[in-house]
Image (cartoon, rainbow, N blue to C red):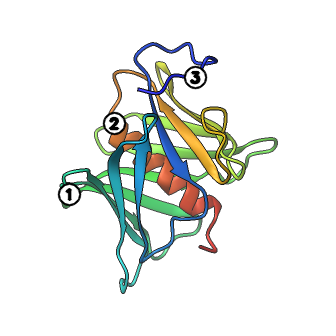
Amino acid sequence: MFRNRHEDHAGANVYQMHQQIFAIGDDFWIENGAGQRVFKVDGKALRIRKTLVLEGADGRELYAIKEKLVTVRDVMEIQRGEDRVATVKKALISPLRERYDVHFEAGGEWKVQGNIVDHQYEIEGPNGKIAEVGKKWFRVRDTYGVQVEAGNDDALVLAVAIVVDQMAHPAR
C-alpha cells in the first residue's frame, strides 16, 4: 500500500481518482496507492437520468449512483441493489465553504465540506473524520486522492466522493 511521508493515519486506505472523467457513458478504474485497479465505475449510457455503477474489481456491483429527476436543489442517491442507502444533497447556504449533506436510510449523516471544486475537502461523521480528499498523495496532473480512515466502507466513501464530484462539476 502506498504511504506518503505526510500520512500519519495507520490503517487508512488511499485511492487515486482522476479529475474530469466522470462522464456518463464512460468507464474508468479507481486505483489504490500501489496502482492496483480495485474499483471500476461504469457510466451507464442511454439512461434518462445520470447513472453510475461502482463495481468491485471482480465486476460485482457494489453501489449505484443515480440522479433524482425532479428536485429543488441538487440531489443524488446511492443505492445497493434496489435499496436506497444514502441521499446526498448540496447545502443551500454555505458562506465560506461548499458543503454537502449525506443522509443515510439506516439513520445518521455525514457532512462533506471544504473546497469541493478543487478536490480539497473532508467527509465527517458523528465520530469524526471519515475521509480526506486532496491532491497531496499523488503528483500526477488531474489526479487526486481519497484517504479513507480505517473501519469505514471504502466503496461507500468512494461513492460519496463520486457523487460530490458529479454535483460540483455538472457540465460533464
84 with respect to 33 (left or right): left
Q: Secondary structure at mark 2?
A: loop
Q: Which residue is mark 1?
A: 59
Residue at 80% across / 44% down in the picture?
95
Cα separation, mark 1 vs mark 2, equals 29 Å
Q: Amino acid at mark 2?
A: Gly
Q: Mark 1 or mark 2: which comes first in sequence?
A: 1
Q: Position of residue 98 (x, y in %)?
A: 71, 46
- Front tag of 3 and 2: 3
- Front tag of 1 and 3: 3
Please tell me which residue lies in front, 18 or 74.
18
In this rendering, the count of numbered labels is 3
Please tell me which residue lies in front, 31 or 23.
31
Residue 116 vs 26, above or below: the answer is above
Q: Quadrant of the C terminus?
A: bottom right
Q: Which residue is mark 3?
A: 4
